[in-house]
Amino acid sequence: MILTLVFFKKRKVVLKRILPTVVLKIIVIAVLAASIVFVAGCSKTVATVNGVVVKQDEVEAYVNFLLIQDPEASANLTDEERIDLEINIIDSLLVVKLLEQYAANNNIIASQEEVDMQMNAVIASYASESEFESDLKNKNVDRKFLEYELQNQILRNKIYSEATAEVIVTGEQIEEYYNENREAMFRIPSRIRVSHILSIFPWIEDQTIEENDQDKESVRGKIEFVAKQLENGAEFGDMAREYSDDTATGADGGDLGFITEGQMVEEFETAAFSLEVGETSGIVETMFGYHIIKVFDKEEGTIQGFEEVKENISAYLINQKRAEKWEEFIMKLIEDADIQYLSENEGNLNEVGGEAEDESGGESSGEEDDVLLDDESLEDYLDENE
């Protein structure tokens, strides 16, 4: 169920000719794995790391599995793209084997009890164990292979914890991040609660209908009737329930909830944010049809205080520093390893940490290499870890 593939973004300058992305970054991808049985017998060796081999069968098994995930994209895969994928997987498997070697050399083990606990957690996500077994069978997943992958994940997590154990974030760093980003990251925008009544253009619902003036006038006539009823004192919610073509909101009186700037199409947004609470707009035309909009509530924007967000900032900064430390650890393993490529599709790990020359032939200043991680905003981090 968990296929531990380690993919790399190439470091700036050193591998600029290969990929525009710039840094080495380990990404563990959790995917539902097919049953992969590596047959070492007659398969040729494509690479070794400290004497441990990577076989062509291993590479092909992972390549085929990844291609199965997206048949449409696979059908359009060029020969060059497939070679790049194979190279990526070879390097990924080499790093996986490096981590296994590190675990063995440092008495880091995944006990059977730990593997069983993880397996039980997987099974518990199903309605029953029989359903779990049925799903394995349907997806052609071998249970032994699943256990092997769970074991690898446990080992990796233990190594990660050991390698990043000393990472800390100080209060000063947290406050500095807040002060530098308070406007960009911690401003809560103004928002309004709106309802609308929509008279929709027929070509929005039925794409076989071409835009035409006659239907547009008919749609306009409907919304003008609604506007007249509102002027005469009709209740907005009642009119939305009876006449709105927005089936998602009509039954709720046209309620769209709270919106912020940038969420709606420009014409709708401009009209809505110009209204005061309790005010109803005139007829507003958008690409979807004609709207009448009413604002029911408004909340002014504000900036979150430091005390509100300091725990989130701390978690975010620790995550970033651990990622940097983990990269340094992986790169050190690679730099110290004896890696041999034995096929024409040679990987890139031997270039990690080497003296880099830029495209003009000069040596790298090293400034670019100081950036170990792609920037990830706190907002993205919180979204991912919510």
Image: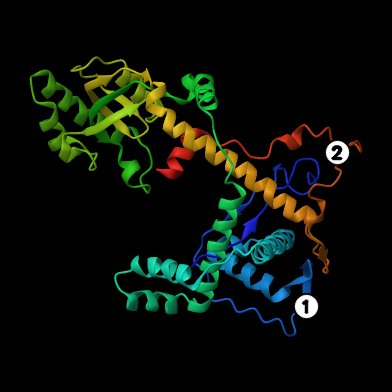
Distance CA(mark 2)–CA(mark 1): 35 Å
Mark 1 Cα shell of 10 Å, populated few (<14), some (14-19), many (≥20): some
Q: Secondary structure at mark 2?
A: loop
In this rendered view, identify the residue nearer to me: 10 or 20. 10
- Residue 213 in percent (x, y) is at 33, 32
Residue at the image position 37 percent from the left and 26 percent from the top: 308
Q: In the picture provided, is 188 more to the left or to the right than 318?
A: left
- Residue 229 in percent (x, y) is at 11, 24
Say what amino acid the circle numbered 1 marks.
Lys
- Residue 367 in percent (x, y) is at 77, 31
Q: In the picture provided, is 43 more to the left or to the right than 217?
A: right
- Residue 139 in percent (x, y) is at 46, 75
Q: Secondary structure at mark 1?
A: loop
In this rendered view, identify the residue nearer to me: 258 or 284. 258
Quadrant of residue 289 within the rendered picture = top left
Residue 179 in the image: above or below residue 312:
above
Disc assigned to residue 44: 1
Mark 2 Cα shell of 10 Å, populated few (<14), some (14-19), many (≥20): some
Say what amino acid the circle numbered 2 marks.
Asp
Disc assigned to residue 358: 2
Q: CB atoms at circles 2 and 1 under 8 Å apart?
A: no
For the C terminus, the quadrant is: top left
Q: In the picture provided, is 264 more to the left or to the right than 7?
A: left
Residue at the image position 9 percent from the left and 26 percent from the top: 235
Q: Name the outermost residue toward the front.
A: 107
**Could one spot residue 240 in this view of the protein?**
yes
Q: Name the outermost residue toward the left.
A: 233
Q: Name the outermost residue toward the bottom.
A: 41
Residue at the image position 47 percent from the left and 26 percent from the top: 185
